[in-house]
Image (tube, rainbow, N blue to C red):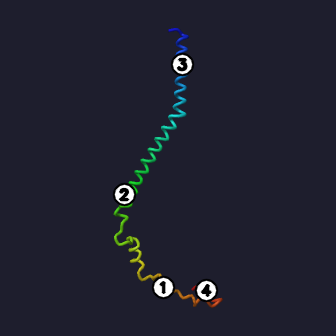
Amino acid sequence: MHARDLSHRLTHEYSEFKMWAEFFVKKQLPMQTRGFLNRTETLMNEKSNRFLAYIRNSRLLKKSDGISEFFKNIGEVEKGNGEISDYYDMSDNSEGDNNKIS
């Protein structure tokens, strides 16, 4: 093989590789990336929906009596300390200059 034939062959191979690389970077890579991202998004949505459904059906979140233990305990602690329905009489403080809080 002569040097001229070798040079011509290498130039031809380089040109084909350059066209292939340009096609791959401009066309194939974006298309493959979009496909991968779409598949990943679909998979993540399915997994999150399945996980959220599992959380929604959890026994820890379901209470048979409709009130949580926290509010039951607060009610027991605050018994005797007053109620929301207690009446506050403001007529004692409505005498003008005698609005001092003792």
The residues bearing labels 2 and 3 have C-alpha atoms spaced at a distance of: 60 Å
The local secondary structure at tag 2 comes to helix
Q: Name the image quarter holding residue 53.
A: bottom left
* Residue 26 pos. (x, y %): 55, 34
Q: Quadrant of the C terminus?
A: bottom right
Q: Amino acid at mark 4?
A: Lys
The residues bearing labels 2 and 4 have C-alpha atoms spaced at a distance of: 58 Å
Residue 86 numbered mark, or none? 1
Q: Nearer the viewer, mark 2 or mark 4?
A: 2
Q: Amino acid at mark 2?
A: Tyr
Q: Circle 4 is placed at which residue position?
A: 100
Q: Amino acid at mark 3?
A: His
Which mark is first along the chain, 3 or 2? 3
Q: Nearer the viewer, mark 4 or mark 3?
A: 3
Q: Name the image quarter holding residue 82.
A: bottom left
Q: Circle 3 is placed at which residue position?
A: 12
The residues bearing labels 1 and 3 have C-alpha atoms spaced at a distance of: 96 Å
Q: Nearer the viewer, mark 2 or mark 3?
A: 3
In the rendered image, the vertical position of residue 58 relative to residue 93, given as above or below: above
The residues bearing labels 4 and 1 have C-alpha atoms spaced at a distance of: 22 Å
Residue 54 numbered mark, or none? 2
Q: Residue at x 35, y 61 (%)?
A: 58
* Residue 55 pos. (x, y %): 38, 59
How many numbered marks, from 0 up?
Answer: 4
Q: Nearer the viewer, mark 1 or mark 2?
A: 2
* Residue 32 pos. (x, y %): 48, 37
Q: Residue at x 54, y 10 (%)?
A: 3
